[in-house]
Image (cartoon, rainbow, N blue to C red):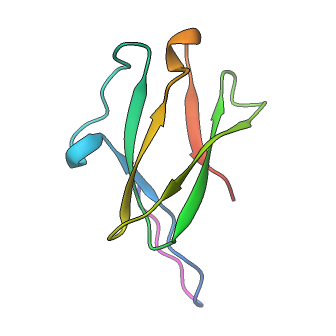
Amino acid sequence: ISLTTTGGAPAAPTFTGVGGGPLQPPRNGQFQIEVHSDQAQMTIQASDDLVNWADAGIVTFVNGKAIFTDTNAGAHAKRFYRPKT
């Protein structure tokens, strides 16, 4: 998903699998996504139910991309991610 905004606000981030490919299931209890944004840093939140969200980590962008790793993904039957706004 990619959104573009006007009026000087930053564009919404996009998420892909590492290397720009499709998202992959967790491996060895960890889940990774590549995040693309024009921001310097971003907090990624995680949820098990899409209702209750908690900060899962902060990524720092280099040349517009960063890798987020959830080392706790294996402890959850399902997990959802979003950028903190």
Count the marks: how many?
0
Residue drawn at 38 percent across, 40 percent down:
33
Of 13 and 72, the residue lying toward us: 72
Residue range corresponding to the magenta coloring: 2-6
Determine whether 71 is above or below 42 in the image. above
Determine whether 40 is above or below 70 in the image. below
Residue 84: where, in percent of width, then height? 67, 53
Residue drawn at 57 percent across, 30 percent down:
80
Farthest-out residue, right? 52
Q: Can the viewer see residue 33? A: yes
Q: Can the viewer see residue 77? A: no
Q: Main secondary structure of the magenta part?
A: loop
Residue drawn at 47 percent across, 60 percent down:
13
Give the side of residue 82 with respect to residue 60, left or right: right
Determine whether 62 is above or below 49 in the image. below
Residue 43: where, in percent of width, then height? 62, 52
Residue drawn at 36 percent across, 68 percent down:
64
Residue 58: where, in percent of width, then height? 58, 50
In the rendered image, the quadrant that contains the C terminus is bottom right
Magenta segment includes 57? no
Give the side of residue 74 with respect to residue 54, left or right: left
Give the side of residue 3 with respect to residue 17, left or right: right
Residue 27: where, in percent of width, then height? 34, 17
Q: Quadrant of residue 9?
A: bottom right
